[in-house]
Amino acid sequence: MRSVAKKIIGSVVYAIAVIGIALAVWAGAAAAVDSEFVLPSVQTTAREFVKIFGITDFRSGLGGTLLRSSVGFFISLGLFFATFFTSTAFPVFKCIIEPIISALRSLPAVAVTLILSLAVGGYGTPIVLGVLVIYPIMYSAAQARTATVSAELKEICVLLGANKRQTFKALWFPNLAGGLPDSLSSAFSYNIKAVIGAEILAQTAESLGMLMSQAQAYLEPARLIALVIAAVIVSVSAEIALRFALKLALRRYAD
């Protein structure tokens, strides 16, 4: 128990130190530039950060971004489990899906966003892009995690007469589950960033991306930085919360 408390305290102290150093560098750079239009001061940005939470557009934009991120995440999760189960059950399918996964990982996100904005519109583009970005990450992480499963364990399942569903439940999922809290929470956090980027390019209504685009167009750097900070806080908070929930739900499979 003490070791856990020490670890938590150490993480908090480290985070505070990093934030303090970043703020000091920011303050020094802002003082050197001496222009609120180029690099606003820490104080100006802090006031803007507090102000945006009282704006209706920010609350609706944050809600829209989180909704699109969640929809894309659960679609990716469904695709991931379906294809991972199929690839473990049928080696031929694995040979087919892995080149597709490699191709998806190589897609240029900006170009794909521009194409999607024409095909599915501003609302659907961030969702689809999020799926294209994080689904390959989920699948690749699962393959790396289960690559060490020995041939002997697979043979035992065959000798015991286990069907494909039973083999997945008894062999593949327990090996996979220990890494899910970290991989899925990181994927969700990364998905939020990908969704915001797509929202900026697709000019998605009621989104953090649109608010950032407007702040840039109206020459409001303090608001733009405040929105970026808010997005980072939301992303990190979501990752921590999801990791904690998954570790609690999958604690029997913990490494």
Image: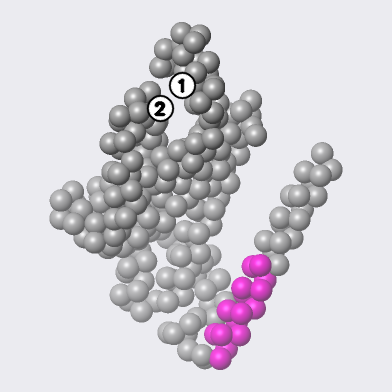
Mark 1 secondary-structure assignment = helix
Q: Residue at x 81, y 44 (%)?
A: 3
- Quadrant of the drawing holding the N terminus: top right
- Does residue 29 belong to the magenta stretch? yes
Compute the Cα span from label 2 to label 1.
Answer: 8 Å
Q: Nearer the viewer, residue 149 or 24?
A: 149
Residue 74: give x, y in percent of width and height. Answer: 38, 36
Q: Indicate the position of residue 32 as horizontal and vertical percent values.
A: 56, 91
Q: Are marks 2 and 1 in contact (CB under 8 Å)?
A: yes
| Figure label count | 2
Q: Residue at x 45, y 64 (%)?
A: 227
Image coordinates for residue 66, horizontal then vertical, percent: 41, 47
> Looking at the picture, how far across and down is residue 222, in whole percent?
46, 75
Mark with earlier residue (2, 1): 2
Name the side, left or right, on which 80 lies relative to 174.
left
Q: Nearer the viewer, residue 82 or 14?
A: 82
The magenta region covers: 18-32
159 to 208, vertically: above or below = above
Q: Which residue is mark 1?
A: 168
Q: Which residue is mark 2?
A: 88
Question: Which image quarter holds the C terminus?
Answer: top right
- Toward the top, the furthest residue is 161
The residue positioned 30% from the left and 75% from the top of the image is 217
In terms of secondary structure, what is the magenta stretch mainly?
helix
